[in-house]
Image: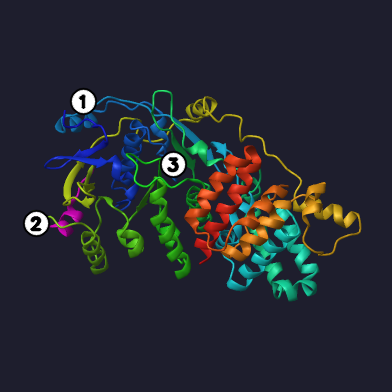
Amino acid sequence: MAGVDQDGKIFVGKSVKPEYLTLHYGNRHGLVTGATGTGKTVTLQILAEGFSRAGVPVFAADIKGDLSGVAAVGEAKDAFVKRAKEMGLDYQPDEFPVMFWDVFGEQGHPVRATISEMGPVLLSRMMDLNDTQEGVLNIAFRVADDQGLMLLDLKDLRAVLGLIADHAGELTTQYGNVSKTSVGAIQRQLLVLENQGGTKFFSEPALALTDFMKTTSDGRGYINILTADKLMANPRLYATFLLWLLSELFEQLPEIGDPDKPKLVFFFDEAHLLFNDAPKALLEKIEQVVRLIRSKGVGVYFVTQNPLDVPETVLAQMGNRVQHALRAFTPRDQKAVKAAADTFRPNPKLNTAQVITELGKGEALVSFLEGNGTPSLVERTMVRPPAARLGTITDAERKAVIAKSPVKGKYEQAVDSESAYEILQKRTKDGADGVGPAATEAEANAGGGGGVLGGIGGFLGGLFGTNRARGTRLSTGQKITREITRTVTNRVAGQIAADLGKSLGGSMGRSVGRAIVRGALGGILRG
């Protein structure tokens, strides 16, 4: 039947022919655009359902709550049944495996990260720091690495900032000027971050991204939904958080080239927030991450109002396109419509710019990669109806989904490990509150803590231009990192990480390997 998903393809709708998104090209990224209320979220749900059926896990942020319905069985509404029949599809209500996540831990499993994992670059953007303040924050990270101080939560970062402010004179020669005014400004921004719920996010246990990539026993991919209505109260926080997730995926996943289907599909709703007011250097790095993450088997799909919201260098990588209606009441609107039309491969039988303004409910212009990876001619398409519920679920239904989640109980309880704050408190109590030399290997072996930061952090700082290693006592890791040559590329670093994980085994291997890969990504993000 024409309207049924085929092996290796997702049925999206029907134009003059069935329109399929080929799974093999699912990691070539995509773009869903259109004015508010034209059906972008419905298309996002249809794509998520299709990927899930094909065994591909999905991550998507739910800003308005209307994506949560994918966890509940749909309703055979007359309009849905009629549209399905017109496409040669027997409408069958369905539900999909869902895991709910929430940065604040209120409507899903808590999502946490450590300060070290976020790193100074993204943390600076999250707090909207200027260049001088970002420089001071980098010094704080470097001092923490050299001193073997783990930066896990906000109080750790506050403590280290206080340390460098108190000893600014001692640090100037080795690290550069540390202005107490800049430290004070960063401390104020940390207070704002705390008031926005940062204390809940920056803690342990940190998120294991493998939990985003689960499938059910019958082979369906889990749809991971991040509840983002509260997170969107701070658009910069929302965008930086999702960029961090993308960065983590890039760091942790191995190179696999072009698989038969993606390992994960990542939907970035309100994508314009990622690019608004972003400095040129950051835009270039975002473009690099999007381009390189494809080889990790991850497809990134931006959802926004107009293709012009996405920089040209990023837009050029969006191989699969769905364009819903745009308004054209003003000359500026008309210019935007023409620009949107120009992003498609022209169809001589279609006036693309005119059709964009005429599209009705459930309609879109569609162009997917086909054949040898070239975009298909743009076609006016009736989008298939979703199989799951369209709209929100109740609180009781959400709780029931969370209760049967495969990660239930893993993240609910926060852990406060000994880290920079506690160590500095102890030093003060013992009367040793100065900034001494970095911890030696012997001190690390004796239990001083953070030995791997002293070795890996300092090494990677010089090699990749960043210091983002996570503190654990691993003198073996120090020895291994000294063996790595300065010609290591990001790709080789990924292989080294995998080899180290296998050779060392357990959490030690993962920690050392992760530190090396983080350094590689730091080089990408920092340029």
Q: Where are the magenta residues, as a range?
A: 350-361
Check the image and tell me how it is coloured.
rainbow
Residue 475 position, x and y percent, is 72, 49
Please tell me how crowded label 2 is: few (under 14), some (14-19), or many (20+) other residues with Cα within 10 Å: few
Spatial CA span between label 3 and label 1: 28 Å
Element assignment for label 3: strand
Tell me the mark number nearer the camera, choosing from 3 and 1. Answer: 3
Q: Which residue is mark 1?
A: 90
Q: CA distance from mark 3 to mark 2?
A: 36 Å
Quadrant for residue 339, please give it. bottom left
- Nearest the viewer among 256 and 487 is 487
- Considering every residue shown, the one lying at the far left of the view is 349
Q: Is residue 478 magenta?
A: no
Place of residue 8 in the rendered image (x, y in percent of width and height, measured from the top left): 27, 35
User: Mark 3 or 1 closer to N-term?
Assistant: 3
Name the side, left or right, on which 470 lies relative to 304. right
**Residue at 43% in and 33% down:** 222
Point 66% across, 35% down: residue: 413
User: Which circle marks residue 348 in the picture?
Assistant: 2
Circle 2 sits in a helix, a strand or a loop, which is it?
A: loop
The amino acid type, in three-letter code, at marker 3 is Phe
Give residue 59's mark.
3
Which residue is depicted at the point 33% across and 26% down? 94
Between 248 and 12, the residue placed more toward the observer is 248
